[in-house]
Image (cartoon, rainbow, N blue to C red):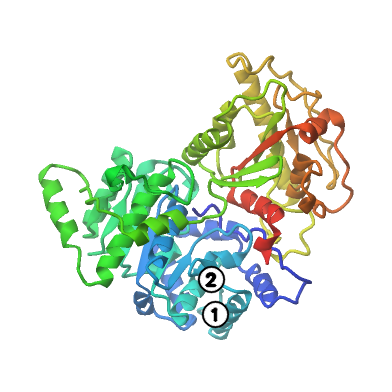
Amino acid sequence: MAEEMLPAWEATGTAEGTDPDVDAIRTLNTLQTNASYLEQVKRERGDPQAQLEAMRSFLERSGLKVEDLDRLNIIHVTGTKGKGSACAFTECILRSYGLKTGFYSSPHLVQVRERIRINGQPISKELFSKYFWLVYNRLEETKDPAHASMPAYFRFLTIMAFHVFLQEKVDLAVVEVGIGGAYDCTNIIRAPVVCGISALGIDHTSILGDTMEKIAWQKGGIFKRGVPAFTVVQPERPLEVLRERARERECPLYLCPELDAFERDHQALELGLAGAHQRSNAALALQLARAWLQHRDCRGLGELKDALLDTELGGRPVPLAPAFRPTDAMIQGLRDTEWLGRTQVLPRGPVTWYLDGAHTTSSIQACVRWFRQAALNQDKPCDGSEVRVLLFNATGDRDTAALLKLLVPCHFDYAIFCPNFTEVSVASNVDQQNFNVTVENALTRCLENQRTWTRLLEEKGGQDPWLPTPLRAGGLLQPSPSPSRGSLLLVPPAPRPLNSPALVFPCLAQAVRWVVQGRDPRLGGWGCSGAHPQPAASSGAVLLREAAAVRVLVTGSLHLVGGVLRLLDPTLSQ
């Protein structure tokens, strides 16, 4: 599920310059930045060939031809929600057959190496460094007056992934689209084995369009002549657009049955990823994996062609692919799938972290349903021994108010807003080099979110008996014009969080430390540069320290989730 293409949060693991990939990552970060790249996409979107030709040129300068990619036996997947999860399910299923898998996804959560995986694991630092410099040096050596540029961050990593998969001789490659489909740089793939489209929604509207129909047109751009494609249940009009795109491209398109259809004999399939919304991703993965296996075994897709004939006679706009009995390897693959930062639960003593990188209205809705089921199925103790905390940030052109409105019914005691920076000072962390967002801009966005949350609670106060009184205007302290980078910016006005006070912190380290209140010794060494003042008792610190259970939902941004993961599990940075 590609939220952004910026480098996120990577720990170098040892002293600067000693890891083999540090210089490579630092050089990678000097490539064209995300904001500039997106502007380029907007300029070129009227002519998709402009982007694909540019990508093809970069690929050839790196030493590969488009035809070389045919050997990768690619499964190409797009969508708005859940495409990363569908890819993860698909890769794990096929790995369960003993196949050597490649997996290219975005964005990464902790380390950039996560984007390029072999057999489910990020490539090693040594391999990352080896292939980075192989591709980078070839592109440098082939510069001339007509081809003087270097590919942007995401384009470069896509080319690098192709080199890794070819030279490491994977049996197949699962490739997740970055943004959209028609103009995405992964769409230079000309002959995938099978394509998939997960659930559609509204996201990246400045690039893909502001309606579901426009977005569906973009996603359908990955269809290829004669290559089977599968999609999940979609709204009627976007599904019609997908059907027309498939007809234009002579692509056989099929609708996946619900996962229930695969659960015969009342035996529910166990999924490694939590949440009811993962069932459609799992159903899509089963169809993608089976189509790939049929292709490998040269059995063709006769069963699907029969289904196409039968269902078209019945007038179905998109034929329903037949359900089948999952093999033992498929069942194991679904059960063993792991995908960090998506409906992930991390217990840490009295504090339990619920991590989900949802960043669209539909994915936030799914996140709320999952969180309610996972964490809010019991009544809040009368003695207040349970505290619920929201940790939120959103980036880009997303409608933050719409996202936050969906989270209000979860009845959080505190809402914390902070930038995606693990620490304010990022000089020691090459993957925190973000050339597009300043600390001041990020904090401004957080303050806007804090005000929005307060307003939403004021509006909700008269309707929800859980809220005893509406928040008073001006009830929260305002930040100074030049807030200290190392201090807490906002504190709630009362010792008891009866009106869900909102706080803003300048970095994730301080936000996480405030939540745990010293109850997790593993977090003792983290913090922003500068002083680490302890918030006053009136800020809720006492309540957090004494609570029998603290439940924290982290959502709104995959990069926010990645920063929290890096703090909670330092082994992910090694």
Q: Residue furthest bottom?
A: 141
Label 1, label 2: how far apart the Cα atoms are = 8 Å
* Label drawn at residue 61: none
Displayed quadrant of residue 327: bottom left
Please state which amino acid type lies under the numbered disc 1: Val
Residue for point 38% across, 51% down: 282
At 81% from the left and 24% from the top, the residue drawn is 495
Q: Position of residue 74 (x, y in %)?
A: 37, 68
Task: Please rate how many residues cluster around mark 2, counting C-alpha atoms within 10 Å: few if below 14, some from 14 to 19, many from 20.
Answer: many
Instruction: Give the labeled residue for mark 1.
Output: 135
Q: Dots 1 and 2: beta carbons under 8 Å? A: yes
In the rendered image, the vertical position of residue 286 relative to residue 452, given as above or below: below
Residue 21 location, x and y as percent?
A: 66, 75
Kindly identify which residue carries mark 2: 156
**Depth order, front residue of 201/345:** 345
Q: In front: 382, or 104?
A: 382
Residue 458 at x, y = what percent?
A: 65, 20
- Type of residue at label 2? Phe
Q: Is residue 215 left or right of residue 447?
A: left
Q: Quadrant of the C terminus?
A: bottom right
